[in-house]
Image (spheres, rainbow, N blue to C red):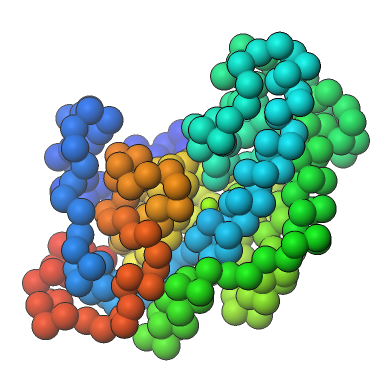
Amino acid sequence: MIRGASDKLDYPVKPSFARTYQAGLHILTSPHSPLSPAQTRDRVLGARGVLFDLDGVLTPTAEVHMSAWSRLFTPFLAEHEVKPYTDADYFAFIDGKPRYDGVRSLLASRGLSLPDGEPEDAPELETVCGLGNRKNKAFNETLAEDGVSPYPGSLRFLDAVVAAGLQVAVVTSSLNGQMVLTAAGLRDRFEIVVDGVRARAEKLAGKPAPDTYLFGAELLGLTAAECVVVEDAESGIQSGRAGDFGLVLGVDRGVGSAVLFEAGADTVVADLAELLPLTGSTVSSSSTANGVHA
Ligand SMILES: [Mg+2]
């Protein structure tokens, strides 16, 4: 069953999570102890599926997105004579969210608002959808011009988890998910792709709500506790945490590990190759006792 963001408190809460979060201290206290690489490998190998975010996890498309957002908002904010757009705005207000939600958040940060409009709005229109579509046009142009290659470490990690018998899926907010996967030569590697198009069709709430990841797990025939979520965005980590997934693995591509830990990551790596080779430790039985199959 897929639940809405509003009833996420109904999710079963792991004891370590409960101690920190039920006290209402989740932002102010340091997060649960990060897992060591060996513990992380054990938790991955103890899982049955891995749900990969796309942009910034499998492909360096976060940079293409950042550049496209900047090409949209730099002139737009200058025209409206408000604080100029910076890359920090991308991480604070846009990263990982569905496109139109990102537009709304950024506008709100400058005390601006626009009518929503319609998803079919032309990129020239001054509506939330029009601006979002303007950004998408810039993104498509950059992707077509420059192409994209997967992160080598992510590709090796993907190979390793598949070789270990785990199922894999992609869960991305992007409406361009299929195009990016194809451009990166990864389309044939994933039978299950929950992208922005699918999320909209299924009426799923976007990240940071857990719904798209839960839907991905369901399509794999797995529970959240049996799955690893791999994310590079604060909103995506929150999504994995809210869904109470077996392991929430952060990849720091610029957000900063402290932010990802605060959002609920169990562990953070700079590159997924840090977890290779993906072999279990001799203490796997004790380190997984409270882990994926808890
Ligand atoms: Mg991402």
Task: Work out which residue is located at the far bottom of the displayed protein and give it.
Answer: 163
On the question of residue 95 being in view, the answer is yes
Give the percent coordinates (x, y) of residue 2: 50, 51
Q: Is residue 140 above or below residue 104?
A: below
Residue in the image at 14% along x and 40% along y: 19
102 and 225: which is toward the camera: 102
What residue sits 90% from the left and 35% below the top? 122
The percent coordinates of residue 109 (x first, y second) are 57, 19
Residue 15 spot, x, y in % from top left: 16, 48
Work out whether 101 lies above or below 210: above
- Residue 262 locus on image (x, y percent): 30, 39
- Depth order, front residue of 3/89: 89
Q: Is residue 173 left or right of residue 276?
A: right
The C terminus: image quadrant: bottom left
Q: Report the residue at 33% width, 78% height from top.
A: 276
Give the left or right position of residue 158, taking residue 102 as reference.
Answer: left
Residue 11 in view (yes/no): no
Q: Quadrant of residue 81?
A: top right
45 or 148: nearer the eye?
148
The residue lying at 16 percent from left, 50 percent from top is: 33
